[in-house]
Image (cartoon, grey):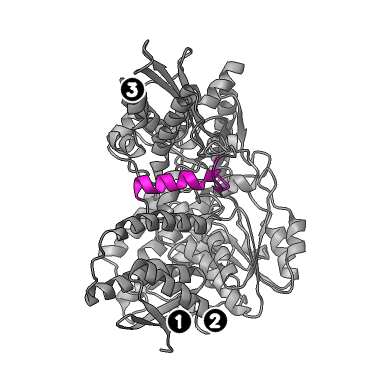
Amino acid sequence: MWDYTDKVKEHFLNPRNVGEITDADAVGEVGSLACGDALKLFIKLDEKKERIVDAKFQTFGCGSAIASSSALTEMVKGKTLDEALGVTNQEIADYLGGLPEEKMHCSVMGQEALEAAIAKYRGVEAPKHGHDHVETEGEIVCKCFGLTDLFLKKVIASNKLTTAEQVTHFTKAGGACGGCIPKIKELIAEVTGEEKKVARDKPAVKLTNLRKMQLIQETLENEIRPQLWADGGDLELIDIDGPNVQVAFRKACAGCASSGYTAKFVEQKLRELVSSDINVQEVQG
Amino acid sequence: MREIYLDNNATTKVDERVFEEMRPYFCELYGNPSSMHFFGGQVQKKVDEARGRVAALLGALPDEIVFTACGTESDNAAIRSALEVFPEKRHVITSRIEHPAVLTQCRNLTKRGYRVTELNVDGEGRLDLKELEAAVDDDTAIVSLMYANNETGVVFPIEEAARIVKKKGALFHTDAVQAVGKIPLNMAESAVDMLSLSGHKLHAPKGVGVLYVRRGTPFRPFLVGGHQERGRRAGTENTASIIAMGKACEIAHLHMDEEGGRVREMRDRLQRELTSLIPNTRINGGGAERLPNTLSIAMEFVEGEGILLLLSEKGICASSGSACTSGSLEPSHVLRAMGVPFTCAHGSIRFSLSRFTTDDDIDAVIKELPPIISRLRQMSPFGREFLAKQ
């Protein structure tokens, strides 16, 4: 059973603002029956059309989707449209005392519906997520849930996600057939790489030998070996001598015709994540 | 709050009689059955008695019964054994609606170069034996098909399937954890080579299972070590649980017919009342032969987790085929394989009864579920559209 907070349970059992606003200024819809969750959000503005005076929702979805919708409608009341747009999915989750990580996509759905409603009201192009299975801007990455690279990158960046599993928890991408998981990993690398580039522009701190060895080991364990395991392969770190990193290939990688490429891949990763002067050498050991 | 427990395909209450039977084997009669003293020997006798009781329920011989730690172990042991027995054969057949204990293992085999055929089911969850016949060939090491499905209760024609498979020289295994104790089995007149069962699905405790291995069926052990279970499953026997398993099988054997009839009547009444009180439902597998205790009912425009949480508020324990409850994001692989539309699959609830289910329990569901569904439909954009049309 999910470990829902009391606040989530309370908002699920007694959801605020269920229903519709017949003369709503803005309506945002995301999700579909096929997706397993959907949210329709209604917003009413004051006479000056500045502040949100009322919000109502209809949700098809699990307990946390209903609770997130309820929380969202409470949070945006009294806010200007710009203030409302500033509400992040993390704030929705925080309002509820937290959500299980597997359920974070429910809070993302709330944020999306809000963006969609406000964009529609302002007459601008609705934000293109693809969550509603419409071909949209960007390239569709997750075919099962119709999610684009732009949307995924935004969620990865704003929630500081580092694993494909987290991306699935937050957006559902990769949660069905799993075919797009390699692509999601690339997106994570792109986003975190971009951030690293920014970080690298700062004067580089010289790595001590000890720190460098630690980093090499961590990178091998966390970034490289899991990818080799996926193809039935493995490697072992034999020695680190200055910039030279010696590895021996194991299992399917041992004697594999493309082990040269694999060595290049390892080198590229280590150069990217540890230090640009690293050379990887394959040894028998 | 009184619990109304209708989730017996997930796990069952340990029958008090079963618990009394196993109780002395913890603090008093704790001997090791392999020991060469009276203290271990008396436990050995009880383990033998348990073996005989399990065999009687299955229509099997005592030496065909191997005790394991769970149904999953039994399934894993059966499939791995067949692959070791036929190292040259590289093909395995199963169905798309198997329990993960079988399906995950088969899918992992594809990574090791095995060809794995997953047989389809029709809209009612039924197998097409012609598809099986066409799939099995000289390269097939083992066919593993479940006796009855845990989500829908649909029963496969296991004997016909086993006979088709035996003609082609492959081994036949069935995961019967949901069937044993609910419908009669007779291994004496069966073509099945191996069959799995699980203690906690039939009122014995968790942590004990059985693999039936027909006499003469080649077998390679999964766990190796000591000589326990005639070398087919090493490890000191879980004596108390094995004794409990024996008692649970004895009770099931004595009362299956009477209990099955009573349970079926309650299940049928629940199905009848819910379908008449709640518009737009469908019974998953309703057109097929089903276990007497299982009802999988799909309700359009609502999502299963919400239903379960609201039922739980009323003390009612059930289970769902929905994605949100399981941590996966797609509705159950069983319902998808059956082609149940997404509109229904997300709102599918399984009620599974047992000998301890009462008419009051059924009345409670009939009373509580319809208002829960209309409440969630009021809340759902699709439900409101549907209600507006009405």
The residue that mark 3 highlights is A80
| The label number, if any, that marks residue A249 in the structure image | 1
> Are the two marked residues, 2 and 1, in contact with CB atoms closer than 8 angstroms?
yes
Callout 1 secondary element = strand
Residue at 42%, 87% in the rendered image: A283
Give the answer, above or below, for where B387 lies relative to A196. above
Was residue A56 drawn as part of the magenta stretch in this picture?
A: no
| Residue B43 place in picture, x, y as percent | 36, 70
Query: Which image quarter holds the C terminus of chain B?
Result: top right
Chain part drawn in magenta: A137-160
Q: How far apart are marks 2 and 1 (CA)?
A: 9 Å
Disc nearer the start of the sequence (3/1):
3
What amino acid type should be assigned to the residue bearing mark 2?
A: Cys
Query: Is disc 3 in the same subunit as disc 1?
Result: yes
| Residue B239 place in picture, x, y as percent | 37, 67
Image-based side of A150 in relation to B344, left or right: left
> Are the two marked residues, 3 and 2, in contact with CB atoms closer than 8 angstroms?
no
| The label number, if any, that marks residue A256 in the structure image | 2
Of the two numbered discs 3 and 2 in the rendering, the one whose residue sits closer to the viewer: 3
Please identify the quarter of the rendering in which residue B131 is found: bottom right
Callout 3 secondary element = loop
